[in-house]
Image (cartoon, rainbow, N blue to C red):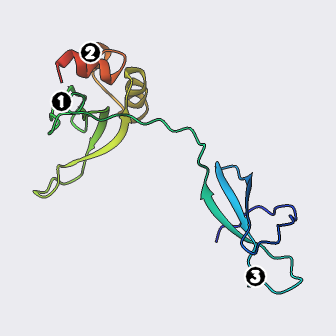
Amino acid sequence: MIRLPTLAPHTFSSHANAVQRDHADTNGCAISRVATDRLRPGAAQNKQVRERRSGRDRTIIALTADTIPAHHSKSLPAQLNSRWRVADDPRQWILQKRKGQHRSKSSGWLSRSFCATRSALLRCIREYCGNVDAESLNPIENLPETHLEWRRSKGN
């Protein structure tokens, strides 16, 4: 059970269902305090309800037919070694590790990291892949800085 922070006592208007939304917790959610006429008379209890703050900044990416193909290409920018490879989807490069046993119902690969920039991809390769041949890293080092630039250069 999640405990909400204790709020200072507050007086409500005479209306039985008055709602005040002036308190906010650290998660960016507004806390509404609702006083109802069902509470015991004289009790200093208020029901607390979590609500999303309406003024919160959100970034929305427009997905159009020009930016995402109907079926993303299963292109393989690089095979790093026998257990690791780099694949891509419409938004990022994916660092994948081979599963233990390949079965017909699965691809045989686990996605480990999702990287939108070349520098993040190289960092993840250093951290997770172990020994990688320099020739295998050549295609990764020659990629554009962002996945979007790489996608545009391919014409997708």
Q: Label 1 neighbourhood size at 10 Å, few (<14), some (14-19), many (20+)?
A: few
Q: Label 3 neighbourhood size at 10 Å, few (<14), some (14-19), many (20+)?
A: few
Mark 3: which secondary structure?
loop
Nearer to us in this view, 33 or 15: 15
Q: Name the image quarter holding residue 125.
A: top left
Mark 2: which secondary structure?
helix
Please give the residue where the numbered disc 2 appears in the rendered image.
Answer: 138
Residue 26, position as x, y percentages in the image: 70, 49
Position of residue 117 relative to residue 141, above or below, is below
Please give the residue where the numbered disc 1 appears in the rendered image.
Answer: 76
Residue 97, position as x, y percentages in the image: 28, 42
Residue visible at 38% across and 34% down? 61
Residue visible at 10% across and 56% down? 104
Please give the residue where the numbered disc 3 appears in the rendered image.
Answer: 37
Amino acid type of the residue that numbered disc 1 sits on in the rendered structure:
Leu
Residue 51, position as x, y percentages in the image: 61, 59
Number of dots carrying numbers = 3
Counting residues from the start of the chain, the first of labels 1 and 2 encountered is 1
Amino acid type of the residue that numbered disc 2 sits on in the rendered structure:
Asn
Counting residues from the start of the chain, the first of labels 3 and 2 encountered is 3
